[in-house]
Amino acid sequence: MDFALPADVEAMRRRIRAFVEEEILPVEADRACRDEHDNIAEPALGDLRARARAAGLWSLQMPRERGGGGLAMVGMAACYEEMNRSIFGPVVFNAAAPDDGNMMVLNRVGTEAQKARWLQPIIDGRVRSAFAMTEPHPGSGSDPSMMRTRAERRGDRWVVSGRKWFITGAGVAQHFILIARTSDDPRKGLTAFLFDRDQPGWEIVRRIPIMGPEEHGGHCELVFDGLEIPDGDVLMGVGDGLKVTQIRLGPARLTHCMRWLGLAKRCLEIAGAYVTERESFGTTLAGREGVRWMLGDAAMRIELGRLMTMKAAWTLDRGGRARKELSMAKVLVADTLHTAADTAIQLCGARGYSTDTVLEWIYRYARQARLVDGASEVHRMVLSGAYLDEGDAFWSWG
């Protein structure tokens, strides 16, 4: 097993790290560059995005022929981790959710006409996007079979009615991927549609307040009442909606893990610097055995998360589904992010709890990690089911 990165990926990783250090961290440190939702403000973001594009560090997950960097999943794992050394990193490089996952699924399953109309503007940074699947009770959450939003065929069009909520980025999105029910077939009853913000027949009824910080566009509740979508804007085929969600959500879960590992490492970076200089009772905090145990345990958890994430990325790059690996990475890294943030705040004391560092920002953000893209309990159910089905083959090497 060779854990060394290919030379071109390692070079890209180093360039991203330097860009984050020299260009993004100074902006992150200036609280005047934040918006009212504790994210990077649009003027500062626009400037950094232009610099990232000029440096050749733009949309690295997309094919080169579409203006991207052509990275495979293993390369993305290494580079996304470096991007999220800053809390504002991923959006600067056009690698933040939900655009990241939407670009990947559109690139994989969209027709050439759909890629030109719906994908390329996201790659170019001219628009943002959202993925509309989750619904209020009794609609679908982790269980898509409970989908209640319906699309009914009328002539050559589909007419949508229903409600979605916690749709990330909807407040600023121009392009949407919508999952709706088109029949009661248990496997082929859902269909994925593409629609534009300016089409009539739907509205955002509220931006749902959350613990925060928030992604650009927030988490919104949407109501559909007569939205019309032509056949040409069906993604894949009628009845392929469940397949679209599976294709999209697996890699998207993994890219979350890649980014979260960057944040977890940043937490230890801040804590490590503090404990090596802060003195108490005649020695630095780093000289205390208990402090060393806390740092060592958090560092070990981060490395475990990196290995699990890389294994999942490696499996996907070789054409595997990586269902078990994705679930394990999602559970492990979500917990690791929270542990790293909590440990760093404890070691930094009142300074860590204050806004003098980004630790409190990361801590608030970390709490959602165990919920988004499938709650940890759901992924544990997936893993237990796989073990009961496979037995000892659960741990096979190939």
Image (cartoon, grey):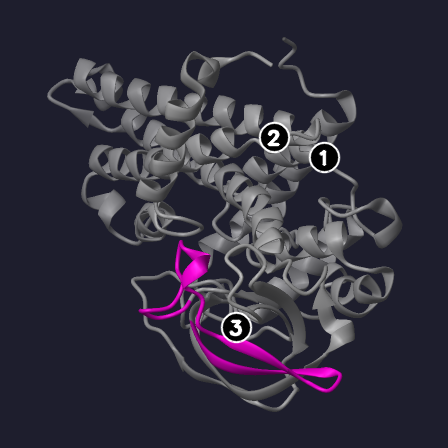
Residue 70, located in which quarter of the rendered image? Answer: top right
Instruction: Looking at the image, tell me whether mark 2 or mark 1 is earlier in sequence order.
Output: 1
Identify the amino acid type marked 3. Answer: Ala
Q: Which mark is residue 313?
A: 2
Which residue appears at 46% of the width and 80% of the height?
A: 162
**Secondary structure at numbered mark 3:** loop
Tags 1 and 3 touching, CB below 8 Å: no
Q: To which residue does mark 1 refer?
A: 72
Q: Is residue 296 left or right of residue 167?
A: left
Q: Is residue 230 above or below residue 370?
A: below
Image location of residue 57, percent across then percent down: 73, 46
Which residue appears farthest toward the left when viewing the image?
281
Does residue 156 sit above or below 91 in this rendering? below
Q: Position of residue 341 (x, y in %)?
A: 31, 39
Residue picked out by circle 3: 170
Question: Quadrant of the rendered structure where residue 97 is?
Answer: bottom right
Q: Secondary structure at mark 2?
A: helix
State which tag comes first along the sequence, 3 or 2.
3
Q: Earlier in the sequence, mark 1 or mark 3?
A: 1
- Work out whether residue 249 can be spotted: yes
Cα separation between marks 3 and 2: 28 Å
Answer left or right for 23 relative to 380. right
How far across and down, in percent of the image, does residue 293 sit?
A: 24, 17
Spot occupied by residue 377 in the image (x, y as percentages of width and height): 30, 42
Magenta highlight range: 135-164
Q: Residues within 10 Å of mark 2 (few under 14, many from 20)?
A: many
Asked whether residue 136 is drawn in magenta, I would say yes
Q: Quadrant of the N terminus?
A: top right
Is disc 3 in contact with disc 2, using a CB cutoff of under 8 Å? no
